[in-house]
Amino acid sequence: MRESRSFVCLFVGVIFIEMASTTTKIQTLRSLIKELRRTVGNHDRVQQTPIFSYVMNEYRRNAVTDQQYCHQQEEITYLAQTCATYLTSSRRYLELYDAYHGCGERSVKETASMVGFKLPNER
Amino acid sequence: MNEFFPSDCVKCALNSEEKKKKATVSTHHPNNYSAALTMRGLFWPVAPQLLNQNPLIIIARRFFPEPRKRFFKNVTVAGTSNLYEINLDHRKLKTPAGNLIQVPNYGLALAVANEWSAVKEKIRPSLMHLTGLTNTVLDNPGRTTKYDLSGKIIEYLDTDTLLFREDATDDFTQLQVKEWDPVLNWFNERFETDLKPCHGFLAAEVSTQTKERIRRYLLSYDIWAVNGLLYGTEALKSVILTLAAAERKISAIKAVELSRLETNFQTSRWGSVEWGHDLERYDAESRFSAALLFTHLNTWQGCK
């Protein structure tokens, strides 16, 4: 069950070059929490981890919404976005690496099937 | 590989870990298998003289030993308001040199602890960028100061990615102007510099005044943040993009995208290879966002 959050989601226009592109602040928070959930083990709940309470405290302390522009809020949103990027990219890198390089040397048959070919003697 | 040096034999590698450089004969390889005398990381090809002498041999350590499995259950952060430590079960996390990891802010300690608790089965230290950065700052193996590090960052300014423009293709030149010029203009305005893009084979002209200005800016950060900035610059090969991201003008993903503009342009035309292009992209993103996270957590004066 998700914690209820009292954020108001209004989309404010992009600030300067490409600040947070078109994602709102609540979306940044949600993607960060989603990534944190993936790093937690099977039997734990992400709400109980200290990193979750730290993130939520920071967001609440500065009342991060899209309705106003405040220096502290921008810092925290940017931090959350960077953290989410880090977790996502390292997870995806690991997935790709394991998929392609994780199992040592493949046989000729396996390599062929990876690119959609069949060996000449097969039907 | 010849039969005398089974480089992919797991058993040999495991044995070598246990027996630790004591000379042993490999008992599970039949018929006179022998391995070259090696030192850790080096490989001397088996020479005929060695074979004739039938020496006692040391099983070679593989170049890529098996990663350690996860040996801890919980990762916790403990500490006072100034120094935070990370505990794996009851053990305290230490740097490679043996120093205790004590970070000055809570957010960073949590992030490093998260890297360790995210380990599913195998521990891969090469992918734990925040831990690596913390280790570098605390150990300081190169005995580098803030001045050395900022000098290293300045060196990347001469060959900054954003300053090298394409001449031949119209599409790509326009794309470069559209994507890179706003960031370059912001940089010139913010730091009062006059960096201009260059064409052809000539390198960009960066005046000493520009370098001094950037050096002074970099020295205003502390040793922790400067390490983060150097790591980020090395990931993208661009000082302008790193500083734009440090000032929060562009996001981490956007910065990586801008540094890979040509690669993306070519792959959009000729196709992208998942195990090459995507892997590189995620590697650059994870390094750069780790560096950025490290820098911002160390400069941000939030809740400690």
Image: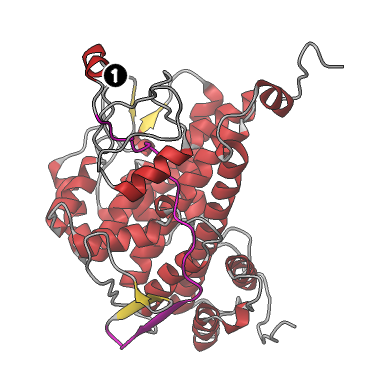
Quadrant showing the N terminus of chain B: top left
Q: Please state the horizontal and vertical placement of residue B268, each as a whole percent of the image.
A: 63, 30
Is residue A75 among the parts visible in the rendering? Answer: yes
Is B54 placed left or right of B207 in the picture?
A: right
Q: Which residue is mark 1?
A: B46
Of B249 and B107, the residue lying toward us: B107
Is B134 placed left or right of B255 in the picture?
A: left
Choose top left, top right, bottom left or bottom right for residue B164: top left
Type of the residue with mark 1: Val
* Residue drawn 28% across the image and 27% down it: B43
Q: Please state the horizontal and vertical placement of residue A94, each as a whole percent of the image.
A: 55, 49
Is B97 placed left or right of B24 in the picture?
A: left
Judge the density around disc 1: few (<14), some (14-19), many (≥20) Cα neighbours within 10 Å.
some
Is B117 placed left or right of B211 in the picture?
A: right
Q: Please state the horizontal and vertical placement of residue A21, each as a whole percent of the image.
A: 58, 58
- Over which residues does the magenta segment extend? B56-82
Quadrant showing the C terminus of chain B: bottom left
The disc numbered 1 marks a residue on which chain?
B
* Residue drawn 32% across the image and 80% down it: B84
Q: Is residue B62 magenta?
A: yes
Choose top left, top right, bottom left or bottom right for residue B46: top left
Is residue B240 among the parts visible in the rendering? Answer: no
Q: Residue farthest to the right?
A: A123
